[in-house]
Image (cartoon, grey):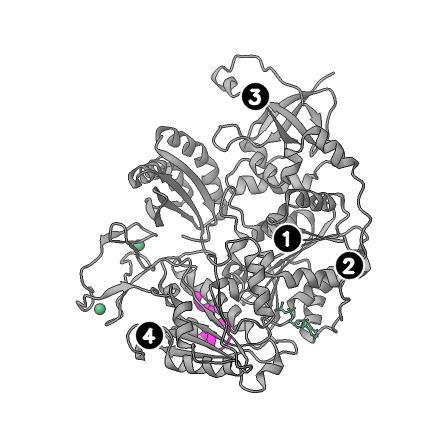
């Protein structure tokens, strides 16, 4: 007797096939079973699926056959089902929880379930031929090498750590562990993990980090803590720099339950872990948790969903939480109930120097075009002469330029929004990325008539060279010339280059490190006593309402790099220098006090007044075409098509605007913002609109690509 089986496969995004296809099989395979199936002349990996209401409702697997899509052109044609080729031996079926996670992610982020499911599996499951797979299965597992790393001294928890751990033991969560840099958050993760491992011989733990190559210390700390007791293979890594073979091996170890801890980047949120009991999201505010292509999911948000789905505890940790998480963890007030996360605070630093003193330099009082103010330069010279290290932080990436008059302080504000209009060099216009309001760039400052109006935040390209000249005569204590290094996306493009450069800094070979946000993350540079932020102002007046949040967290993190070694502070206290034209800005006031809550309160007030997230929900549709008209034409037609439904659901559809980086490789890019005060209503709108987008797309052949980004991070 033969069965009809629904199989999820990855079909091209715009093929119109939702993802699940129906096949025939002699045996009834359990949902979650990995199979190979024919599609056209190809053979694909697929996952046996079941109808998991309610998310399955948008796809109707039984209407599609594996032959092609012609069934939809000729509905009368009898369904000719093809047979499953084979089952992938030796892999237990994926759990219902895993399938539900995938299905939720697909529906929430407006992608096909098949795409999300197959992207979440290691490529070798797909790429190995049946023979190769058979050989892979026969391979005997290597005898596990004993863990040879140094065993770790296990510290007694501080009072704050102990309190956080008691709260984690007593409550369900999710938790927001709001702990200062150096407050010992990692120790809390380790102990929370320990008690889970000890409480249940099968329990598994997922630990997520933003970028693994930026935090090699964290993996080592987990290994040192757990490998002596649980074996060298109790922990596996999951991130994009693994080879396909390593990734398969680690994925299988997690899927089989052998690996007790999975440490990985955003992709690890989809790891198959049948006994998952705890999820840690370290540096939960980090933008790299948001996938920027394909299914644009937020691994942090999915982690919270997954925790709830599987009954696993979730700990989000940060010294500068995302404003979303901060808002969700608000305590109850007299009139309002508490948010749905529980906030755990650890304000003190453990056994380390004090946080650096923040010094603000008013650049209005410096000579025109000063890069390093004379006071800062003097402080740097003194410190390197004593053998201390310095970090110079550039903030040149990711912020759209806003026009600015240095005479009267005029900025290219939008008259209709609480946002600044962005300078588009290409056609010399100022455009609001919120409402689309556009004007050509004024010849002179509208405020005072000054002819010299310019984009904020320029002129940092030659910084490393410039600095080398300024410090050419300075010597280290050993009489050697200074070593100045630069770490940014350009200098680390080659594989392994970042690790090499970081190792140099750690070894003390570098005296001055110049870099972008990459150098501010969790490194432990022991000898750093001065951190300087040169040109942070762009983010204060960015068209992207999240820019101040990112700047604050970047500066707090950078400040956290200084003074990690109390012994270094005997000569002079650590300092963080900020050079700005707006030293009185509330962001810098809060920074000076190391006061994240004050900063968050001020930002949330602004967000509430402007109905921005977390007080509203957003999605973007982006489109690319050879011309701006074509890209915008598609978006505006889609807007038209969705207008009635949007009105009913109280969803705002804004007109299409060019993207900040309007043209890339001769392709014009445009975007359109969708906003709604209800997440549910926005989801309902998007689900409905998706079909219309496909239809409109078919009438706009010039569009090369388009995609929906739900909860976008950059507007
Ligand atoms: P965070 O992740 O919050 O920045 P870490 O967990 O890295 O902080 O801790 C900072 C430093 O303090 C580390 O060197 C860590 O070993 C040490 N540390 C953490 N907790 C304790 C403790 N209870 N007693 C002594 N040292 C601790
Ligand atoms: Zn002016
Ligand atoms: Zn506007």
Residue assigned mark 4: 370
Examine the residues drawn in magenta and state their main secondary structure: helix
For marks 2 and 4, give the CA distance. 52 Å
Q: Secondary structure at mark 3?
A: loop
Q: Is residue 299 left or right of residue 674?
A: right
- Classify mark 3: residues with Cα within 10 Å, few (<14), some (14-19) or many (20+): few
- Classify mark 1: residues with Cα within 10 Å, few (<14), some (14-19) or many (20+): many
Quarter of the image for residue 127 reads top right
The percent coordinates of residue 588 (x first, y second) are 43, 73
Quarter of the image for residue 181 reads bottom right
Q: Which residues are magenta?
A: 590-603
Residue assigned mark 1: 264
For residue 419, above or below residue 661: below
Residue 600 part of the magenta-drawn span? yes
The tag earlier along the polypeptide, 3 or 4, is 3
For marks 2 and 1, give the CA distance. 17 Å
Q: Secondary structure at mark 2?
A: helix
Q: Is residue 338 visible?
A: no
Which one is nearer the viewer's eye here, 220 or 416? Answer: 220
Tell me the number on the disc at residue 40: 3
Residue 120 part of the magenta-drawn span? no
Tell which quarter ligand 3 is in: bottom left
Marks 2 and 4 close (CB-CB < 8 Å): no
The tag earlier along the polypeptide, 2 or 4, is 2
What residue do we see at 31% from left, 76% from top? 364
Which one is nearer the viewer's eye here, 124 or 513? Answer: 513
Residue assigned mark 2: 227
Q: Is residue 326 left or right of residue 309?
A: left
């Amino acid at each position: 007797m033969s069965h009809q089986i629904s199989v999820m496969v990855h079909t091209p995004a715009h093929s119109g096939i939702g993802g699940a296809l129906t096949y025939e099989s002699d045996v009834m395979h359990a949902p979650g079973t990995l199979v190979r199936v024919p599609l056209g002349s190809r053979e694909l990996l697929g996952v046996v699926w079941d109808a998991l209401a309610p998310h399955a409702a948008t796809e109707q697997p039984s209407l599609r056959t594996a032959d092609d899509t012609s069934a939809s052109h000729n509905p009368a044609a009898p369904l000719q089902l093809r047979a499953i080729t084979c089952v992938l031996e030796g892999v237990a079926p994926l759990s219902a929880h895993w399938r539900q996670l995938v299905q939720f992610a697909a529906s929430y982020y407006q992608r096909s379930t098949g795409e999300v499911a197959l992207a979440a599996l290691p490529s070798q499951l797909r790429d190995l031929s049946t023979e190769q797979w058979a050989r892979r299965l026969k391979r005997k597992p290597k005898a596990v090498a004993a863990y040879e790393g140094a065993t770790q001294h296990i510290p007694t928890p501080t009072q704050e750590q102990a309190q956080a751990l008691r709260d984690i033991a007593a409550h369900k969560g999710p938790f927001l562990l709001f702990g200062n840099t150096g407050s010992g958050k990692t120790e809390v993760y380790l102990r929370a993990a320990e008690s889970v491992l000890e409480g249940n011989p099968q329990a598994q733990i997922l630990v997520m980090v933003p970028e693994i190559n930026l935090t090699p210390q964290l993996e080592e700390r987990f290994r040192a803590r757990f490998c002596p007791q649980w074996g060298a293979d109790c922990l596996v890594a999951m991130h994009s720099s693994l080879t396909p073979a390593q990734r398969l091996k680690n994925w299988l170890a997690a899927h089989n339950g052998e690996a007790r801890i999975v440490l990985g980047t955003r992709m690890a949120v989809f790891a198959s872990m049948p006994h998952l009991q705890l999820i840690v999201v370290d540096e939960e505010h980090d933008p790299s948790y948001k996938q920027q292509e394909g299914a644009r999911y937020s691994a942090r948000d999915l982690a919270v969903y997954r925790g709830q789905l599987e009954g696993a505890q979730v700990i989000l940790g940060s010294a500068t939480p995302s404003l979303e998480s901060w808002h969700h963890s608000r305590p109850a007030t007299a009139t309002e109930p508490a948010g749905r996360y529980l906030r755990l605070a650890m304000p003190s630093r453990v056994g380390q120097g004090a946080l650096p003193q923040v010094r603000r330099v008013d650049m209005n009082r410096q000579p025109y075009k000063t890069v390093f103010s004379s006071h800062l330069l003097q402080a740097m010279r003194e410190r390197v002469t004593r053998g201390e290290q310095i970090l110079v932080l550039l903030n040149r990436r990711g912020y759209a330029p806003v026009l600015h008059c240095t005479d009267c302080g005029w900025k290219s504000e939008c008259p209709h929004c609480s946002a600044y209009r962005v300078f588009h060099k290409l056609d010399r216009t100022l455009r609001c990325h919120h409402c689309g309001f556009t004007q050509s760039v004024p010849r002179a400052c509208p405020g005072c008539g000054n002819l010299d109006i310019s984009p904020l935040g320029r002129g940092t390209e030659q910084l490393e060279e410039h600095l080398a000249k300024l410090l050419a005569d300075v010597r280290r204590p050993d009489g050697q010339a200074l070593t100045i290094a630069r770490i940014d996306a350009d200098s680390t493009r080659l594989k392994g280059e970042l690790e090499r450069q970081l190792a140099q800094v750690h070894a003390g070979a570098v005296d001055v490190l110049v870099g972008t946000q990459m150098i501010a993350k969790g490194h432990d540079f022991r000898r750093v006593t001065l951190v300087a932020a040169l040109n942070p102002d762009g983010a204060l007046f960015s068209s992207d309402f999240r820019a101040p949040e990112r700047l604050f967290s970047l500066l707090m993190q950078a400040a956290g790099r200084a003074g990690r070694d109390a012994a270094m502070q005997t000569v002079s206290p650590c300092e963080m220098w900020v050079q700005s034209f707006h030293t009185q800005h509330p962001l810098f006031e809060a920074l000076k006090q190391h006061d994240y809550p004050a900063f968050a309160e001020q930002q949330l007030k602004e967000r509430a007044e402007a109905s921005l997230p977390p007080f509203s929900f957003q999605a973007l549709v982006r489109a690319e075409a050879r011309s701006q008209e074509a890209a915008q034409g598609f978006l505006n037609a889609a807007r038209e098509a969705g207008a009635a439904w949007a009105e009913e659901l109280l969803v705002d559809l804004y007109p299409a605007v060019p993207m900040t980086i309007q043209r890339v490789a001769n392709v014009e890019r445009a975007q359109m913002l969708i906003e709604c005060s209800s997440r549910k209503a926005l989801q309902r709108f998007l689900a409905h609109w998706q079909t219309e987008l496909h239809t409109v797309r078919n009438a706009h052949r010039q569009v090369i690509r388009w995609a929906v980004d739900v909860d976008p991070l950059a507007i």
